[in-house]
Image (cartoon, helix red, strand yellow):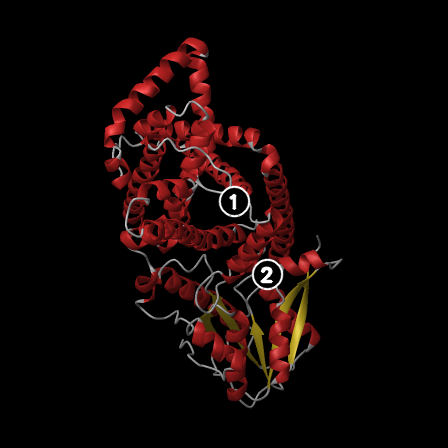
Amino acid sequence: MNIPDNKPHQSLFDRLKHRFIGEPRNINEPSLFHKISLIPILAWIGLGADGLSSSSYGPEEAFKALGPHTYLAIFITFVITHVLLIGYGLYSHVGELGPVAQRYSGGISMDLSTIGFVGIMAIFLRAFSMGGGTYTGIEAVSTAMHIMREPKVQTGKRTMLYLAVSLAITASGLLFCYALFDIKPATGRTLNAILADLTFSGWYLGGALAFITILSEGALLIVGAQSGFAGGPSIMANMAKDSWLPRRFSALSERLTMQNGVLLMGAASLAVLLYTRGSVTALVVMYSINVFLDFTLSQFGMSKFFFQNRSKDKAWASHISIHIIGFILCLTILLVTVFEKFGEGGWVTLVITSALIGLCYLIRSHYLKVRKGVRQLEEILSSIPSGQKPNEEPLNPNERTAILLVSGYSGFGLHSWLSIFREFPKLYRNFIFVSVAEIDSGAFKGASEIDALKASIAEQLEKYVKLARSYGYAADYRMDVATDVVEAATNLCQKIVQEFPKSSVFTGKLVFREENAFQKILHNETAFAIQRRLQWEGITTVILPVRVNI
């Protein structure tokens, strides 16, 4: 079955959009997935900005949380990285290493005698948790695995290695410099800004260099923020496929981006920014709490996975131990951050997150009820017997033709087909079943996935054709693959009408006993959108109600 490749007349808005954003991508281009995938170095540059930019605020939070016990910064950096040197700041103060070490050694001895080892570890734990923002951003790699170059696992591991090493060196180096320069918090200035001024103060054009350094941090933070638009919408798309969010969030734009997720994230980001009035402290708190909630749940899920599959994996104990340690660390950081920052944005984060979780459960509950109703419909219609003698005659363009839009071979489609007989008995002799294989986030994982989707849709359409022919009707099917179902279906129907002038288009739509705005959000208005376009072209289009009792 040929897949049409037509380019309808473009409006001024479309031409401007394609001029600035780019032309629509061709789903059938063989090299498409190779072009849009990321190799490790590019993934490190693009996604790593999210993690590396965390060094602009994470180490500072940890350092300030230490208070007078700043010697623990040395312990933190040794435990994490063992890196003893960073740039000119360390080079210019190499002579201070001895005095600083003696001062911190004396501080340790004094604190051991006053607050004891437990007290020191409590301070360290608090500082470690307050600096947890340093580790935020590394989740960008896992959430963007779908755009990694094959082999994805090896690419992801290498990207994570690049990110971990660069972040460790940067964060530990900053902590060393804070200690060597004996930097103290100042109102209206970040520790990095103070460090840059002190480091470059004696240089020619040192002020300009310090400004460029801080400007680059701000720019990197902006780049890091954009990496969230690579992973966030994909997570929303996966949730939409699993019925936790409206299905429209799994749809792709003509540029093969999850545009609904991007728009929602952008709007939510703007709302939070306005609410916090741009307070970096509040934003970091809100971000860190949700990130470590994500980390904690992920580590718990992996621990549960390896425990349940311990009989299949001989090395399950070594795997689960890593995830249990990660779970304890992430949960500790999460609890301490919530406790310490509850009044500085923590409570707002908990309220918003809890509300979103409740909304997701409400959405999933609705979809499960609809699925149950459709399944009951399929059970009733699955017993439709086939006819005796199939009609092998080709379609006659002079006969009345019913064009039925279906998404697959299901009770929904069979109900729509039978409704045509009930409402228009003995009127149509030709049946053409039309389906558009929607390329959403679930199918957009590789050329093989798209080919499998095409084959599956073709196989299901063949079942409709076989059933219709068994009852003595001439039947055929047409299909297309696209990201925009409405546009592709409209174009297909227009072509069929040109070939079969006496055609009418039929499409089904779920109807509920009590319609409300919530249902309209969860269920797209594809049928109405197609009807509006085709009727404008003068093509008769009928929407057949498919009742679901929920």
* Res. 27 image quadrant: bottom left
Residue 231, horizontal then vertical, whole percent: 44, 52
| Residue with the mark numbered 2 | 411
Q: Secondary structure at mark 2?
A: helix
- Can the viewer see residue 388? no
* Res. 509 image quadrant: bottom right
Mark 2 burial class by Cα count in 10 Å: few <14, some 14-19, many 20+: some
Q: Residue at x 52, y 64 (%)?
A: 408
* Res. 519 image quadrant: bottom right
Q: Amino acid at mark 2?
A: Gly
Height in image: 396 above or below 532? below
Residue 456, horizontal then vertical, whole percent: 43, 63
Height in image: 173 above or below 370? above
Mark 1 burial class by Cα count in 10 Å: few <14, some 14-19, many 20+: few
Task: Describe residue 326's horizontal placement relative to residue 541 as left or right.
Answer: left
Q: Find out whether the residues at labels 2 and 1 contact each other: C-beta distance under 8 Å.
A: no
| Residue with the mark numbered 1 | 280
User: Which label sits in the foreground, 2 or 1?
Assistant: 1
Residue 550, horizontal then vertical, whole percent: 70, 52
> In the depicted view, which residue is nearer to us: 190 or 480?
190
- Can the viewer see residue 354? yes
- Label 2 to label 1: alpha-carbon separation: 53 Å
Q: Residue at x 59, y 37 (%)?
A: 344
Residue 304, horizontal then vertical, whole percent: 44, 32
